[in-house]
Amino acid sequence: MGFEVEPFSVKHGYTPPFKDLDGATAALSTCSKAKPVTHDMPPQPISVAGEVLWSYDVRWEYSDVKWASRSDV
């Protein structure tokens, strides 16, 4: 078993407010099935009092290693 982490910064976009009075979260215009996050997107600028939105994605890949042998590395 194993994993690979590929961090990068993206300036996410959405239509404010991010959460409404019912607690529903706004959809990100920069992150969806139709428009996945890529390395060519503009990075998130950082300031002392700025807002930072974060997201993550998981991609599963098939392996020929049997379940019982997954820790035999």
Image (cartoon, helix red, strand yellow):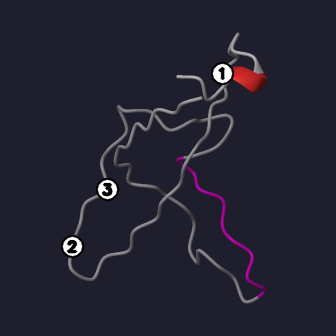
**Amino acid type shown at disc 3:** Gln
| Helix, strand or loop under label 1 | loop
Horizontal side, residue 52 vs residue 65: left or right: left
Q: Position of residue 62 (x, y in %)?
A: 70, 17
In the rendered image, which residue does mark 1 sit on? 61
Q: Which mark is residue 47?
A: 2
Horizontal side, residue 47 vs residue 60: left or right: left
| Helix, strand or loop under label 2 | loop
In the rendered image, which residue does mark 3 sit on? 44
Along the viewing direction, whichever of 19 and 16 lies nearer the viewer: 19
> For the view shown, which residue lies furthest in the front direction?
72
Residue depicted at x 64% and y 43%:
32
**Amino acid type shown at disc 1:** Glu
- Please tell me whether residue 29 belongs to the stretch shown in magenta: yes
Spatial separation of the CA atoms under disc 2 and disc 3: 10 Å
Horizontal side, residue 13 vs residue 48: left or right: right
Residue depicted at x 66% and y 67%:
26
